[in-house]
Amino acid sequence: MATLTELDRLRVDEGENLDLTHRATQIDLPGDPSKDQIEAELDSLRQRIGEIQDLMFTRREQALLVILQGMDSAGKDSTTKAVFTGVNPLGMHAASFSVPTPQERRHDFLWRAHAQVPPLGCIGVFNRSHYEEPVIRRAHGEIKNGEMKRYLRQIADFEQMLAESGTAVLKCFLHIGHDEQRERLQERIDNPLKHWKFDPSDLQERQYWDAYQAAYSQALAATSTAQAPWYVVPADRKPVRNLIVARLVVQALEALKAPPPERKPELARLKVV
Amino acid sequence: MATLTELDRLRVDEGENLDLTHRATQIDLPGDPSKDQIEAELDSLRQRIGEIQDLMFTRREQALLVILQGMDSAGKDSTTKAVFTGVNPLGMHAASFSVPTPQERRHDFLWRAHAQVPPLGCIGVFNRSHYEEPVIRRAHGEIKNGEMKRYLRQIADFEQMLAESGTAVLKCFLHIGHDEQRERLQERIDNPLKHWKFDPSDLQERQYWDAYQAAYSQALAATSTAQAPWYVVPADRKPVRNLIVARLVVQALEALKAPPPERKPELARLKVV
């Protein structure tokens, strides 16, 4: 893919001194494709994702976990729908993480995430994830740097274990600007068909914008590894955001080099009666 | 839909004296549509399923559970893929039930099924289900009629509870003929790309064909209710099978009459800063 370099530029380097406020929230794609051209490429990427998943499913030795994080209204739901609609539901598991329930709070913060990790042979999507707890607590000033670092080490260890167990991890931070978020939240208020999406707490959290950018910068830099890299996806323009995530998913799936279905020589000349 | 009457004819009546060996495994669709016409209708049905699911998701008050049963190679996997690829993965949960694990065996037979029931707002598909245990045990002569009846009463009670809790239940028996199964199992042997699908136990189970037809006949008749009806889907021809299941799913979703997204008048004139 000619876009490999483009994608690499979005990657967070391990231990990078990341400042998300210096990362683009919108970019022009090479060749400046039209909306129709983007949709056509997205279609073919979706098909490719489905094909590779079909192949992975025959051996059930590998899985891909795609983690989507971002500020409220960054488009985690829409991206999931746009990129993964087209995968066989038997090989696909999408999980959304909301405010922890009282039962979940009685467990360590990785417990509920672990329970939703895709089985081998499948693609999993985390719509929010185990990054929520440390980032929210840090943005609200509830924890100091030492505790934040401990969380992030625990996450890195957890993700390394997943990768070593056959589950590749791809992490996308859907990066929108402060103005873009205002427009999107206002749209949820002004358009009655979007009222169901509006959560008053989003307005509260918006007041912590700078603290969230700082907490995410720290979290992404500390947990972007070769086995579980973070990409900062410019997300102000929805078609561009979808296309980039789809390209990243295809790249990650192709890197698995899923072998062809297993052959069983012992079946030769067997006749069903 | 003009096909409502056609679909009704496939339904199992409550308490019917059902004999599956007298039910068709292939039918001609009215108007004898070409393969391309079938695929075009399937496309639009898939889109309709996605639209209604999107709507259901906004209120999260209703769900649909589709149960697929059938003899080995009847096409449970392929039907799931053909009908439900196109639903937003966030609103879709497909579960496959295989031989119970030792841990699952320490629970009642409904336990693992209950855990996989879709949450409100979602569509769930059971690829095999809680019908496996009673049907297999009955077909193998491990249980007498009294115990079979108890299983089936427990299932009917469970499904009634689901329906009363907002989860509509639609059950499709994918009905293939004895010859068709032979051809399909042979194809899994002769085509190395399908070796991964071949399970030697399928040949064992094929020897119990008649006993399975009888056990399924009993199970379907005893558990086909207004709230959780069974349909016997002629499944020798794959495109016809897919189309019928898709029509049944759309019919079940439309019967839910999902209301439009909730409006929140208290949001009027709120400005995001």
Image (spheres, coloured by chain):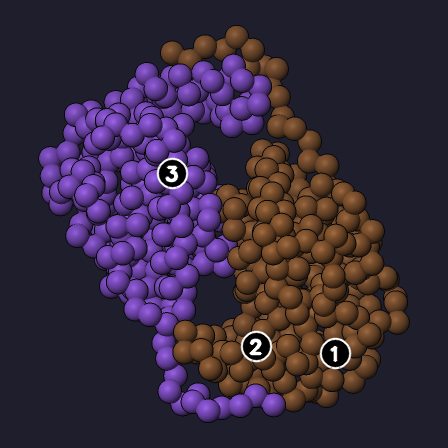
Chain colours: A brown, B purple
Q: Quadrant of residue A127?
A: bottom right
Q: Is residue A215 visible?
A: no
> Which mark is nearer the camera, 1 or 2?
2
Identify which residue, A37 or A188, lies in the foreground: A37
B160 with respect to A203 (left or right): left
Q: Residue furthest top?
A: A269
Where residue A111 sits: x, y (%)? 61, 65
Give the residue displayed 80% in from the left and 54% down from the top.
A6
Q: Which mark is residue A75?
A: none
Q: Quadrant of residue A182?
A: bottom right
Identify which residue, A58 or A149, lies in the foreground: A58
Where residue A270 sits: x, y (%)? 50, 11
Q: Quadrant of residue B186?
A: top left
Judging by the rendered image, the residue that carries numbered circle 1 is A213
Q: Secondary structure at mark 2?
A: helix
- Mark 1 → mark 2, Cα distance in angstroms: 18 Å
A43 with respect to B131 (left or right): right
- Mark 3 → mark 2, Cα distance in angstroms: 36 Å
Q: Secondary structure at mark 3?
A: helix
Characterize the local packing of mark 2: few (<14), some (14-19) or many (20 or more) Cα atoms within 10 angstroms: some
Where residue B253 sits: x, y (%)? 30, 55
Q: Is residue A118 above or below residue A262?
A: below
Q: Secondary structure at mark 1?
A: helix
Q: Subunit of mark 3?
A: B
Q: Subunit of mark 2?
A: A
Q: Which mark is residue B40?
A: 3
- What type is the residue that disc 3 sits on? Ala
Q: Is residue A268 visible?
A: yes
- What type is the residue that disc 1 sits on? Gln
